Amino acid sequence: MINRIYLEKLLPQDFESFFGLTGNEKVMAMITERPLSEEEALEKFNYFLENNELYNSFGSFKVLEVDSSKLLGFAKLEITKEKPEEAG
């Protein structure tokens, strides 16, 4: 099997890339039906960073291409403080 992508947890310096996607109308059309404002995106991003501290293997991740380290998108596998008994 050839590895083509890898995951890295979101870091504070990733906000610009995060907002680049979440603030894009075409990207968000099927997710929230509208782009997020910078304030909304920052609130969501900070929430993701906070949850990333709860568990090493769970949280919000950047999806990157192995060969180029190009950002392909974001993914999450999280256990939140609100529902610690389930992963989503």
Image (spheres, helix red, strand yellow):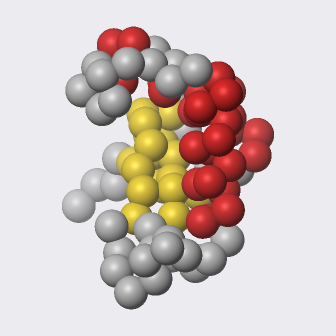
| Residue at the (59%, 54%) spot, across then down | 48
Residue 4 position in % (x across, y down): 35, 47
Left/right placement of residue 34 relative to residue 23 reads left
Left/right of residue 34 with respect to residue 10 in the rendered view: left
Q: How many marks?
A: 0
Seen as rendered, the residue at the extreme top is 25
Which corner quadrant holds the C terminus? bottom left
- Expressed as whole percent of the image width and height from the top left, the position of residue 29 reads 29, 20
Asked if 76 appears above or below 18 in the picture, the reply is below
Hey, which residue is sitting farthest right in the picture?
13
**Quadrant of the rendering where the N terminus is positioned:** bottom left
Q: Identify the residue shown where x is 62% and y is 54%.
A: 47
* Residue 61 placement (x, y as % from top left): 51, 53
Answer left or right for 29 relative to 42: left
> Residue placed at 67% from the left, 28% from the top?
39
| Residue pictured at 55% horizontal, 38% vertical | 69
Q: Residue 77: name its quadrant.
A: bottom left
Along the line of sight, the residue nearer the viewer: 27 or 42: 42
Measured along the vertical axis of the image, is residue 16 above or below residue 59?
Answer: above
Quarter-wise, where is residue 51 in the image? bottom right
46 shown above or below 57: above
Q: Looking at the image, can residue 58 be seen? A: no
| Residue reaching furthest to the front | 82
For the residue pair 5 and 56, the one nearer the viewer reads as 56
Where does the image place residue 9, in percent across and percent down from the top left? 59, 57
Image vertical order of residue 20 relative to residue 14, above or below = above
Can residue 11 be seen at all in this image of the molecule? yes
